[in-house]
Structure formats: C-alpha cells, structure tokens
C-alpha cells in the first residue's frame, strides 16, 4: 500500500463517553473526530463492529456482516425522525467509566421497539424507499441474520444447536413457516440494521469531510453461535450434533502460560476453496464498504492455524494445520483489486508467515511493549529494525496500557517474573534515555519517531491510564470490552501535546488542495 506517513488513535466506539451507558455513533463520535483533527491525527482505528454475543466480545459476533445495534445513537434517531423525543425519554443513571451491558441492552431495546412502531406507522418519507432498497442490497446475509435473531429470541437466547431439530438442519418448510410466523420480528431486526448502516454512513462521511480515515478490524474466525455457521454448517468442522469437533486458539504465548482457547469453529478451507472463496470475497467487500483500511486479525492463521480438539479445556494440546495461504488473497484481489490491509502478524511468526505477508504486500504490526523483554524476537519490535512498510503501536486492545505495563507487578496483569520485569524496565529506560516518570509520552514519542508509515496509539496511552482501563485481558471472560472514556478527558492540553509530537516527526495530515 502507498500510505502517507501519519498517525492515529485506537478507540472502539463503545468506549466513547455519552449519556446512554455505551459509546455510540452519535454526537460523541463526531466530537472524537474533531479531537483527532485538533490533535493532528489522520486515522481512527476501532475493533470489529458486529453484534456482540457471549461475553460482549466484538470477536464473537452473531454475524460477520451485520452491525451492532448497541452502537445506534438515540440522539440521532430523534434527529432523523425515527422516534420522538418523548418516546426516547431521559437516560438512566448509567456508570460513566464502564459499560453495563445488560442495563444498556434493556434500555436501548425499549427505544428501538418504539422507533420501529413509529416507523411502521409513519416512516420518514426519505427512508421508506431507502429501507426497501437496503433489504434488497443486503439480502445475501440479512435474511439469514434477521431470521436467526428472531428465532434466538423465540428460544430465549439459546444457541441454535438447542433449537428444534428441523430448524437446526434448516428444513425448508420449517424455515418458511417460521419466516411467516415471525415476520414482524424479522422486519424489526432488518430495521435495526438499516439504522446502524444509516448512522455509520453519516459518521464516516463526517470523518472523511475532515480528513480522518477509519481502520476497521476483520476477525479471522466467527462465533459458533452465529447466523453464518447456522446458515453454512458444511463450511466448518462440526460433529453430528453440529458442535465444533475442533476449535481455534493459539499455543502458550506472551499472554497466557496455557495458551488461548478461543472456541471458534474452524473453517473447512477445502469447502471455501471449492466455492472460489466466495464468502470471503463478500466479507472483504462488505468490510471495505464500511472502512478505509482493514486490520486482518490473526494473520498467521491464514498460513497455518492452531487446531485444538474440542474436548480439550485448554490450548496446550493442539497442532499446527496449514491454512489457505496466498490462494485466498489472490482470489480476493482478483475480485476486489488491491487490498488496503494491515496484517496482524503477532504470535508464533515463522518465515512462511512473513513470506505470505510480504507476497501480499501487507504491512505488519510492530508492538513497542513487546520490544524489551527476553523473548527471542524482542529485537524485531525495536524501532531501529523497522521498515517503512509497517505499522507501529504502543500497544493493542489485548495488551496492558503502557503505564500498566511499565508498573506491573509479578502475578498481576503479567506472566513475567520479578526478575524479568526488572530486566525489561532497565532495557526500556536505557533505550528511551528517560527516567520513566512520563512513560506513556516517552513511548508515544518513540512510536512517532520511527520510520513506520503509521503510528497508532490506544487512547488509554494518550491519557496515561493504568491497568484498570485495559480493554481486554486475553484468556479471561469477565470485565472485558467495558472501558469507557470519562467525560472531559479529551482535553485541549492532551490534544496539543499529541499534535506537537505528531508534527515534530512529520506525521501531520497533508492539507487538502
């Protein structure tokens, strides 16, 4: 890719401040774009935008194509005439520093249901035909998804493998009967998707008009309890009960001594290849219609993936199995042209993985938190070894914050021993040439000064926040994906300091002619 030297911030929309218990696509998102511009940033990176399921993880969604209704802004619904202000009511007393998902879901559902009733009775003129066209354009995934969500509600949220057998095996007559019986619910879920895409389009246009581009995130795997697996079971390794026979994960690594057992079903790549990778082409196309560049999650899994028997409780006992390799990306490129993709090339990276990345021309990721420990590949992440065709991060959503990482204690937020932590801190301070009292700005400066074409910084690092503000702790199930920015933290002083560093190292946006 021909990237202009620049920088940006990693912040998922759910982490934005606001009155409705969760960040969304409304006023706070536009205000964040304004903050990016004032701070001299060109890019806004976020996590996957799909409808989250178990554990609220954006990497475990009910669909690979749908949007997350929780990101729909009540203010925008009123502004666009989808619901009256009286039906929206006043926000509850939500926590300001984290997302209470059950509370948010219950409250927003009431607003959405009132909006749907109003839309059916008296739809805004400019949206009546647009909704019909939206359903037609997205029918390839929207019909399965809306029926899936309607059935899931009918079965009190149970996974599709616990539904009636006729629905599990997708008997045509049973599906037809349910589609007729659940017609109103199906249209409701299609309406929510229309709202999401409508608001997303407006936000993206707002960002583009101000020179901010968006980096999205495409997970390699999808959730077992999803409309995609339900609709295409033959494309995954499932047993006679439609349960995964093998699941995805990674062996013991930086984050966990027992590895990570993600639990996602694994693709039957032979089936995907037999269809010309049609589903993957559609998936890339759909994502690139939403964002300007894609961070391709777990890139190494396309060369070879860690396969874990579903009966294993941990990820230790697995094996490496060859993935589709360059054949997949060649098919996607033939269909869509050059791909604006960042390869998330972290983990157990072999020469074969590097060769695949380079043959595709994808820039890889360089994580500064991984540059100073005793890992044999730590030197790979030190800036003096970078190439321009790379993206440097102070950290990712899976890492500790920079302050939390630098001040970590053994057994807390780290798998390192006391001696390893001490040695790493010595290496960090020696490399940076500082005393570490302003460690987050020191590390941001290091990222900005590197030759990497893009420098990306989680917003927690810009604000100098500690471990309590982590977005995700890999290998754990509770308390993840909840962090939110406190109102008032996006200050002018913070933005000015970031802009000064950005300008010092020639990363400011180039003015439009």
Image (tube, helix red, strand yellow):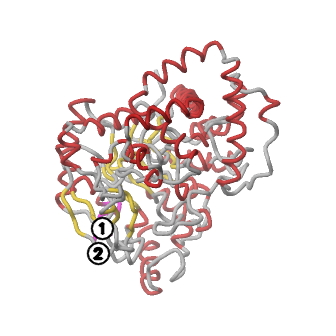
User: Answer yes or no: do the residues labelled 1 and 2 have beta carbons within 8 Å?
Assistant: yes
Q: Give the number of marks.
A: 2
> Residue 34 location, x and y as percent?
62, 36
The residue at 47%/64% (across/down) is 399
Other residues around mark 2 within 10 Å, as few (<14) / some (14–19) / many (≥20)? some
Q: Earlier in the sequence, mark 1 or mark 2?
A: 1
Q: Quadrant of the N terminus?
A: top left
Magenta span contains residue 383: yes
Q: Position of residue 268 (x, y in %)?
A: 24, 51
Dot 2: element: loop
Q: Residues within 10 Å of mark 1 (few under 14, many from 20)?
A: many
Q: How far separated are the C-alphas under marks 1 and 2?
A: 7 Å
Query: Is residue 1 at all visible to an observer of this figure?
Result: no
Residue at position x 33%, y 61% in the image: 248
Kindly state the secondary structure of the residue where label 1 is placed: strand
* Residue holding disc 2: 317
Residue 132 picture location, percent across and down: 52, 18
At 61% across and 43% down in the image, what residue appears? 70
Q: Is 32 in the magenta?
A: no
| As drawn, 76 above or below 451 | above
On screen, residue 68 above or below 259: above
* Residues in magenta, as a range: 377-384
User: Badge 1 is on which residue?
Assistant: 308
Residue 331 x %, y %: 20, 36
Judge by depth and name the residue closer to the eye, 130 or 13.
130
Identified at 32% across, 60% down, the residue is 384
Q: Which mark is residue 480?
A: none
- What is the quadrant of residue 258 in the picture? bottom left
Taking depth in this image into account, of 287 and 340 the one nearest to the observer is 287
Horizontal side of residue 88 vs 382, given as left or right? right
């Amino acid at each position: 890719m021909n990237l202009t030297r620049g920088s940006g911030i990693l912040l998922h929309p759910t982490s934005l401040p606001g009155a409705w218990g969760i960040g969304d696509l409304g006023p706070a998102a536009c205000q964040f774009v304004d903050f990016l511009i004032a701070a001299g940033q060109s890019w806004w990176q976020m996590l996957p935008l799909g409808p989250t399921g178990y554990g609220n993880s954006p990497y475990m969604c009910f669909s690979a194509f749908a949007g997350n209704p929780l990101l729909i802004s009540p203010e925008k619904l009123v502004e666009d005439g989808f619901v009256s202000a009286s039906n929206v009511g006043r926000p509850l007393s939500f926590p300001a520093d984290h997302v209470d998902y059950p509370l948010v879901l219950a409250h927003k559902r009431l607003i959405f249901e009132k909006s749907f009733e109003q839309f059916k009775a008296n739809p805004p003129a400019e949206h009546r035909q647009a909704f019909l066209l939206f359903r037609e354009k997205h029918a390839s995934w929207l019909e399965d998804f809306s029926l899936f969500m309607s059935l899931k509600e009918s079965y009190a949220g149970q996974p599709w493998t616990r539904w009636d057998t006729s629905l599990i095996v997708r008997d045509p007559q049973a599906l037809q009967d349910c589609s007729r019986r659940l017609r109103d619910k199906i249209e409701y879920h299609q309406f929510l998707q229309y709202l999401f895409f409508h608001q997303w389009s407006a936000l993206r246009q707002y960002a583009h008009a101000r020179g901010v581009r968006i980096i999205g995130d495409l997970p390699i795997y999808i959730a077992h309890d999803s409309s995609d697996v339900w609709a295409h079971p033959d494309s995954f390794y499932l047993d006679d009960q439609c349960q995964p026979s093998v699941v995805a994960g990674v062996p013991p690594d930086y984050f966990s001594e027992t590895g990570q057992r993600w639990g996602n079903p694994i693709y039957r790549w032979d089936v995907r290849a037999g269809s010309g990778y049609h589903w993957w082409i559609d998936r890339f196309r759909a994502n690139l219609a939403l964002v300007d560049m894609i961070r391709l999650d777990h890139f190494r899994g396309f060369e070879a993936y860690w396969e874990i028997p579903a009966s294993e409780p941990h990820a230790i006992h697995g094996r490496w199995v060859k993935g589709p390799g360059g054949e997949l990306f060649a098919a996607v490129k033939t269909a869509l042209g050059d791909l604006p993709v960042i390869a998330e090339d972290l983990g157990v990276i072999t020469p074969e993985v590097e060769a695949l990345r380079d043959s595709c021309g994808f820039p890889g990721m360089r994580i500064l938190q991984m540059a100073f420990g005793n890992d044999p590949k730590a030197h790979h992440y030190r800036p003096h070894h970078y190439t321009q065709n790379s993206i440097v991060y102070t950290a990712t959503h899976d890492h500790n914050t920079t302050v939390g990482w630098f001040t970590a204690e053994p057994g807390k937020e780290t798998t390192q021993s006391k001696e390893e932590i001490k040695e790493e801190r010595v290496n960090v301070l020696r490399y940076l040439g500082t005393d570490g009292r302003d460690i987050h700005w020191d590390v941001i400066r290091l990222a900005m000064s590197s030759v990497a074409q893009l420098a990306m910084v989680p917003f927690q690092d810009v604000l100098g926040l500690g471990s309590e503000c982590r977005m995700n702790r890999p290998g754990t199930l509770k308390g993840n994906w909840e962090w939110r920015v406190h109102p008032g933290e996006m200050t002018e002083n913070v933005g000015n300091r970031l802009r000064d560093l950005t300008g010092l190292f020639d990363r400011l946006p180039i003015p439009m002619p």
